[in-house]
Amino acid sequence: MYRSAIYDEPLLNELVSSKKEKIKPLGILPDSLKRNEKINIPDIDETQIVRHFHHLSQMNYGIDSGIYPLGSCTMKYNPKICGEIASWDGFAGTNPYQDVSTIQGNLQVMFELERMLCEITGMDYFSLQPAAGAQGELLGMLLTRAYHGFNKDFERNEIILPDTSHGTNPASAAMTGYKLVELPSTKEGTVDLDVLEKTLSEKTACFMLTNPNTLGIFESEILEISKLVHDTGALLYYDGANMNAIMGKARPGDMGFDIVHLNLHKTFATPHGGGGPGSGPVGVKMKLEKFLPVPRVCKNKKDYFFDYNAPESIGKIKGHYGNFSVLLKAYVYILMMGRDGLRESSEIAVLNSNYMKKKLLDSGRYELPYKELRKHEFVLSCEKLKQEKNVRALDVAKRLLDYGFHPPTIYFPLIVKEALMIEPTESESKEDLDRYVDALIKIADEKPEIVKNAPNNTPVKRVDDVGATKKPILTWNMI
Amino acid sequence: MRLIPNSAIKNTMLEEMGANDIEELFSDIPKKIGIKKLDMPRGLSQQDTEQRLRGIANKNKSFYDIVSFLGGGIKPHYIPSVVKSISSRAEFYTAYTPYQSEASQGFLQAMFEYQSMIAELTGMDISNCSLYGGFTALAEAALMCTRINRKKTFVIPQNISWEKKSILNNYAKGQGIEVKEVSYNIKTGKIDLEELKKHVDENTSGIYIENPNFFGVFEDKVDEISGIVKDAGSLFVVGIDPISLGVTKSPGEYGADIIIGEGRSFGNSMDFGGSSLGIFACKKEHLRQMPGRIIGITKDTDDKRAFCMALQTREQHIRRGRATSNICTNEGLCALAAVSYLSWLGGNGLEELSKINFEKGQKLAESIELIDGFEGMFSGVHFNEFVIKCNKDVNKINKKLLRNGIQGGLVLDTWYPELKNCMLFGITELHTDADIEKLASALKEVSHV
C-alpha cells in the first residue's frame, strides 16, 4: 500500500539564502539594458538540490505509485520503453529547422503515426500539431470556422454542447468567439434527440460531443444525432478524451464525426508529467483537409518532406510540429500494442470499470444515476452519504488518500450530485480493483468525523484551497 | 511481458459480474458501426520495438552528429545530469495535474519554486506554472490585454517568427482582436519607433516587443517604447530569451506589464521543437485575468504550510465558457526541468551562462564577417543569434555546408522577402572554438567557389 513520505521540506530560498547583490554590468550592452543586480536565485550545492527534489518527489503520487482512477483522465501505466526512446539523442537532439534530409526518421514517425491514428478513429487526415486536448478543440473550432467561411456560411455562430461536456469544450468554443448553447441530458444521461433537433438551426456551426460521454455512457443514437446535425449543415465534433473505451470496437469516423481530437497522454499511454506536456492531434474528414495547419508531412517515392502549400490552411496553432516527444512515445506504444493490443486495452478498461461499478452498486453504499451499462468509466453519487451522514464526495476522496489510493475525479460531470467519477483503466489488476472497492465501502461505513477529518497519512492534512485564492501567495517574495 | 493484467482472468471477472462475454459490455454500440478489428499490424515485442526505433533514429542527424548553427529560437544547451535525474523521477513524471493537493505536495512545491524563480528572472510579481510554449504564450498575452482594458488592437513588430504571428492571429480572430504590424529598421534590425507611434492609439490593447528580437538584436529603446505604451494607456508585453536575462535588465525594470518567452533552453532538449515551455509572468494587479494554472501557498487544518492550485475559478474546469483560457494540460514536466536547472545554475551560474552565450555570439559573428562575401546585416548589438547577408544563394551554401557535416543558419527569405540571401545564425555554450573554426573554414571554401 502506498504511503507518502512526510518532510517539512524548506523552499529553495530557505535552504540557502540569497540576497540582492550588485554585479559588474556587461560593457558592450546598450546602457538601457545593462543588468546591475544579480538575479536573486540562490546558489546551492548539487547534493542539496538532489535531496530537495528527491524529498519532493517522495511527497507526490504518480501512476507508478499505485492505482490512479481519475475519471476522464485515463491514467494508465506508461511503458518505460516509450520514455527511454524519446530521450535518445537521435530524436531529442534534433532541431525543427534542420535540413529535411537529416530528419527523415522524425518525419517517418509523424507520417506513420498519422496513418495509425486515421485507422484507429476512421478519419481521413490528422494534424499532430496541437499541444493538448484543449488545443485540439481550439483547432477544431478554427477548422469549423474556416469550413463555414469557405462555404460563405457566415451566420453560423453557435456551438451546441451537452451539459455533461468537459469544461475545455465550452472554453475552447468561447475562445474562438462562438456563442454556447448547452443541451440538458435525458433521464438516461444521454443526448435528447428532440431537444437537439429543436436547438439545431442555420445558426449552428458545430455540435461537440464526447462518446462515450463523461458519464461513461455510449450515445447509442449517435447515427441519428449525426444525421440531425448534418441535415442542418452543421459539423459534428468528437472530444476524444474517452477514446480508451472503444479502440478496435468502434470508430468516431464511422459514427459520422467530422472532426476528432485525441489525447495521446490519455489513450496512448504517454505520461502526464504532473500536468503536461501532452498532445492533442486532430483528425478530419476529407472535406476539411484543406484547412488543416501547415506543414503536412508527405512522402514521395523515397523521401518524406514538409508540405507548406495549402492556401486554405488556417496556418499554425503551435510552434513547429507539435509536441514531437509525446508523438514519438505514442507511436512506440501503438507499435507495441498493435491492433489486438489496442482492442484488448479497451475491452479490459471497460471490463474493469463495469466490474468495479457492479461491486460498488451491490454494496448499496453508493448510487449510480442514469443508465447502468457503462464503458471505461462510471460516475457514482455520494448523495445518500451526504443526506444520511453529511459525508460529501470531497470527504470520501480525501479519506481514500489515507488508504493509500489516489481518489477519483470529483464533482464532475455537473449533472451528478456529489459525483465520484471512476476510471480504473486496463492497467490495474483485479486485486487492486478489489482493494479500491473495499476501501470505498469501508469509508461509507466509517464514522463521519473520521472521514471528514481525512487525510491523516499525507504530508499535510486537509488543505484549505480557498485560502490560496482569498489571499494569494504565489511566489516566495510574497510570503 | 504483460501490460494488461486482467486479460488472463477476464472470464472469471465476467462470471463474477454475471455477464456472458465481453461483447455484452459493448452491446450499446449499434451493430452498424461496430468493427471486428483494426486494419493495422499486430503488436511488436519490446525488444523488436526498440530495434525498429533504433533504425528510425539512425535516419536522423542530431546536434551530436552534425554541428548546427541554426538560429530562430531553438538551440542545443547543456543539460546537467541532475536535471535529467530529477525530471525522470516517476513520482513526478507519471503524475496527473495536482487536483488532489495532499497527494501532490511535492510537485506543487516545485511549481511554486518555478513561479518564484521566473518572477525573479523577469522582474514581475507573479508567474503561472507554464503554457504550451513561447508562441502560444504571446497569443494568450494578447487575449489577456483585451480582457484587462477591453481594447481591441494588438501591436507587434513585423520581425517576429512567422509561426508565432500565425498562431497569434488564430487566437486573436475569435475575440475580434486586430493584430497590427510595425516595420523594423532595415539598417539596425530594431523596431521602427516612428512607425510604432503611428500605429498606436487609444484602441491599442497592448504593444509587444522581443528582447533580443527574432533577428537576435537587442531592442535598446525600451524606455521610449515604454513611454509610448503608457501614453496610450496600453499594456506593455515583452518577449524574452530567458538565458539573456543573466546579463540584461529584467523587462520589469523598464515597465513591462506581461512577460512571455520560450523556456525550453532551461534544462529541456530541443525535441524537434516540442515539448516546449511557455513562460508567462505579469504584474500582480492583472492576476485575475491571467491564463493557466497558478500554484499558491495556503494552510492545512493544522495550520501547517501547504501548497495548492490557486485561483482555480479562472480556469475552464470551474468557469467553463467564461474561463480566462481553455488551457488544461500544460507543460508541467518542462517547468520541473526548468526549476531544477535554475537551482543547479544559481544566480551566479545564470549570469556566467548568459555571458558565455553573449560572447560566443560576438565571436561567431566576427569570424563570419571576416570572410569575403559575408556581412552582418544589422548594426544593432546582438545576443547569441544574428543575421548574415551572403553574396551567394544561401540554399546552395547550406547544401555545401551539409556535405561538410555542418548545418548552416536559418534561411530567412521565405518569410522575409526583403532579406534575400540572409541567414539567421545561432550559437550556445555547447559550441566549441573548433566548431566555429570548422564553420569559418567551410564558409571560406564556399565563398571561393
Image: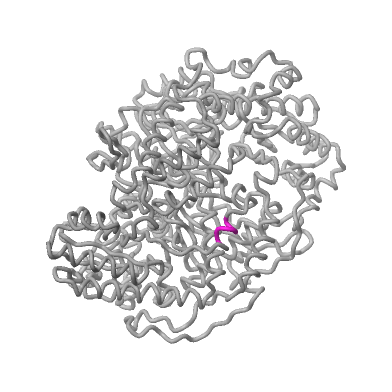
Q: Position of residue B195 (x, y in %)?
A: 20, 68
Q: Position of residue B324 (x, y in %)?
A: 48, 52
Residue A341 appears in the figure: yes
* Front-most of residues A30 and B75: B75
* Front-most of residues B3 and B64: B64
Q: Image quadrant for the N terminus of chain B?
A: top right
Query: Quadrant of residue A152 in the image?
Result: top left
- Total count of labels: 0
x 69%, y 22%: residue: B10
Scheme of colours in the image: one colour
Q: Furthest-right residue in view?
A: A447
x 15%, y 59%: residue: B420
Look at the image and say whether residue B85 sits in the magenta stretch.
yes
* Front-most of residues A76 and B195: A76
Look at the image and say whether residue B79 sits in the magenta stretch.
no
x 63%, y 57%: residue: B107
In the image, taking residue A260 as reference, residue B419 lies left or right, namely left
Task: Name the magenta segment's main secondary structure.
Answer: helix
Q: Is residue A126 above or below residue B84?
A: above
* Front-most of residues B404 and B186: B404
Q: Is residue A34 above or below residue A252?
A: below
Q: Image quadrant for the C terminus of chain B?
A: bottom left
Q: Position of residue B425 (x, y in %)?
A: 28, 64
Q: Is residue B23 above or below residue B200?
A: above
Residue B71 appears in the figure: no
Q: Position of residue B254 (x, y in %)?
A: 39, 76
Q: Is residue B23 above or below residue A274?
A: above
Residue range (magenta):
B83-87
